[in-house]
Image (cartoon, rainbow, N blue to C red):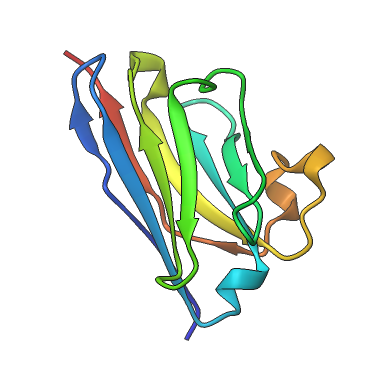
Amino acid sequence: QLQVVESGGGLVQPGGSLRLSCAASGFAFSAYAIAWFRQAPGKEREGVSCISSSGATTTYADSVKGRFTISRDNAKNTVYLQMNSLKPEDTGVYYCAAVRGIVWGSWSSSAKYDYWGQGTQVTVSS
């Protein structure tokens, strides 16, 4: 049974940190690039970061560069998103998505992804 499950969200003060996890099963995880997207209320879903199937290549949205780090452990079928120096504008539901055969020029296009999780809420507020 195919599953993509995000965890690690919560309420954090500005300047704080969170680590999100994305655990997958039911497909060849190590052959898929994995991305994190987020969606704030009233806004479109946006790409946050993406990592290649091997973990050798990563990319980030300009808004999170230098603050967020994506990584993966293929032995555990899990991708992580370490989020530091969080800002109120980072608030939203964070989704994990998988695609086989990433095209880096369009990594942030949500329509390209095959499998999605249900999301985890991140709220940055004092």
Q: Residue at x 31, y 35 (%)?
A: 122
Q: Residue furthest front?
A: 56
Which quarter of the figure has residue 65?
A: top right
Expressed as whole percent of the image width and height from the top left, the position of residue 26 reads 51, 82
For residue 58, above or below residue 74: above
Which quarter of the figure has residue 43?
A: top right
Expressed as whole percent of the image width and height from the top left, the position of residue 98 reads 61, 60
Most foreground residue, 119 or 48: 48
Q: Residue at x 40, y 51 (%)?
A: 119
Expressed as whole percent of the image width and height from the top left, the position of residue 58 reads 63, 41
For residue 27, above or below residue 65: below
Assign the C terminus to one quadrant of the image: top left
Count of numbered marks:
0
Expressed as whole percent of the image width and height from the top left, the position of residue 1 reads 47, 86
Q: Residue at x 82, y 49 (%)?
A: 103
Position of 91 with respect to 55 (left or right) is left
Which quarter of the figure has residue 31?
A: bottom right
